[in-house]
Image (tube, rainbow, N blue to C red):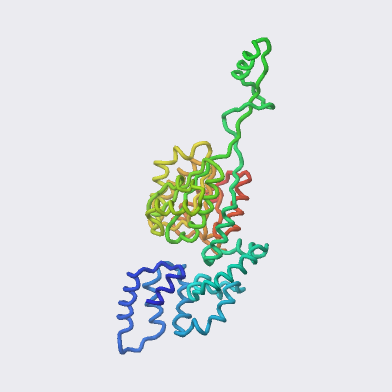
């Protein structure tokens, strides 16, 4: 039970039902008065407590540390605490920062003292550079709070596009006859001043479809903070989230206070950290919302890892319809942080042929690169067809 509490504090979603199932499984795999190997204990607990392969590194570290010595917290405090402030050279030998915070629950005085030191260190350029390159999934609670402050200052400048409407302009190439006659009436009709007009340029609408399934949980939460900053910075921004259903959270993100906005978003979402039905969610968006939100050459951001529980059924048709209805379709996938990423899942293979840009979104640097990429004219190139 204490080991399950440790895993829960490290960020793994382990409820009482899994703890009870784990105890029953251990009674079957390790009956009383029998010699049990350590490997049997490990594989039995991992089979019951883990639900995704991404959780195994944290489970392995917690299992080795927790079951090695019952008095670990007393003798390893001085060894492990300095390592919590740095990063080793090899990623496979790193200890999870969330596991470190869960193992060693420090006192309030020590936490306040470290917070003061961390605040002085974060003001330097090097600390911000390290934080910008750090993965959202490996950040501690203090690092996540600092990252949210940096995200609140980010913006997403889309280039202006020329519309069919005209507005008065001194150097316009078109003569506005109605305005010219109106000006001549003001002067008695003796002189007809020519009022010129030019095409109006506006920022295109921005539509965001964000995946909030269990595999996207650490990234979608941080991206919602980014969307809150964008929504309060400009108009014509629509935000939708989807897991097993589609939810419009544009009105909730309009609140100026980010904490109040996130609380309202949490109340509106009923399927957070559940399964993923990308095809059904896109079908609902294309049927109910596309006509009213994708007008005037809207740019669409699709934030998802492409892991669909329906194996991409009907996903290709819905992606094709979404791509044809929008000016640009940009897919943001946190799995692109891996150098050996391959489009093997059926959902990923169904989505790739219909996107204009395929970019990673897993840290602050990727968000900055996203803003830099979208601030420039995007070449219409379905490169993945």
Front residue (pair 216, 184): 184
In-image side of 365 versus 171 (left or right): left
Residue 77 drawn above or below residue 14: below
Q: Residue at x 63, y 64 (%)?
A: 122
> Would residue 119 appear left or right of 354 to someone viewing this image?
right
Q: Position of residue 376 (x, y in %)?
A: 63, 45
Taking the spot 42% from the left edge, 50% from the top edge, the residue there is 315
Above or below for 343 versus 8 = above
At which x and y percent is residue 358?
Answer: 55, 53
Q: Nearer the viewer, residue 86 or 333?
A: 86
Task: Measuring from the top left, give residue 311's x and y in whole percent.
Answer: 40, 56
Q: Residue 346: which quarter of the image?
A: bottom left
The residue nearer to you, when weighing 97 against 384, is: 97
- The quarter of the image holding the N terminus is bottom left
Please, which residue is most extreme toward the front here? 109
Residue at position x 61%, y 42% from top? Answer: 159
Residue plotted at (30% across, 81% down) = 27
Establish if 29 lies above or below 318. below
Picture quadrant of residue 277: bottom left
Instruction: Give the mark count.
Output: 0
Q: Residue 103: percent from the left, percent from the top? A: 48, 76
């Amino acid at each position: 039970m204490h080991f399950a509490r440790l895993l829960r504090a490290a960020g793994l979603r382990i409820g009482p039902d899994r703890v009870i199932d784990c105890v029953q499984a251990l009674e079957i795999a390790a009956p009383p008065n029998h010699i049990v190997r350590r490997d049997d204990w490990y594989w039995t607990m991992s089979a019951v407590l883990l639900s995704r392969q991404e959780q195994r590194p944290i489970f392995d570290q917690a299992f080795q540390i927790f079951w090695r010595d019952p008095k670990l917290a007393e003798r390893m405090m001085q060894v492990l605490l300095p390592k919590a402030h740095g990063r080793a050279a090899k990623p496979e030998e790193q200890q999870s920062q969330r596991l470190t915070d869960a193992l060693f629950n420090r006192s309030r005085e020590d936490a306040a003292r470290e917070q003061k030191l961390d605040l002085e260190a974060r003001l330097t350029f090097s600390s911000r550079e390290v934080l910008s390159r750090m993965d959202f999934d490996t950040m501690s609670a203090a690092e996540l709070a600092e990252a949210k402050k940096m995200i609140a200052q980010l913006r997403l400048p889309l280039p202006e596009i020329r519309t069919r409407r005209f507005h008065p302009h001194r150097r316009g190439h078109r003569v506005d006859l109605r305005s010219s006659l109106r000006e001549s009436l003001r002067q008695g009709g003796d002189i007809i001043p020519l009022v010129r007009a030019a095409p109006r340029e506006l920022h295109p609408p921005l539509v965001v479809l964000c995946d909030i399934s269990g595999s996207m949980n650490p990234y979608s939460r941080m991206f919602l903070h980014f969307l809150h900053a964008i929504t309060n910075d400009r108009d014509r921004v629509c935000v939708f989230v989807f897991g097993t259903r589609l939810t419009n959270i544009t009105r909730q993100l309009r609140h100026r206070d980010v904490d109040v906005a996130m609380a309202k978003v949490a109340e509106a979402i009923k399927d957070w950290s559940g399964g993923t039905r990308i095809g059904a969610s896109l079908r609902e968006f294309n049927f109910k919302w596309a006509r009213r939100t994708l007008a005037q050459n809207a740019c669409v951001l699709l934030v998802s890892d492409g892991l669909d529980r329906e194996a991409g059924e009907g996903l290709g048709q819905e992606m094709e319809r979404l791509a044809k209805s929008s000016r640009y379709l940009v897919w943001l996938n946190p799995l692109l942080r891996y150098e050996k990423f391959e489009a093997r899942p059926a959902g990923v293979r169904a989505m790739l042929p219909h996107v204009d840009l395929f970019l990673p979104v897993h840290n602050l640097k990727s968000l900055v690169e996203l803003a830099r990429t979208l601030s420039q004219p995007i070449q219409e190139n379905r490169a993945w067809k």
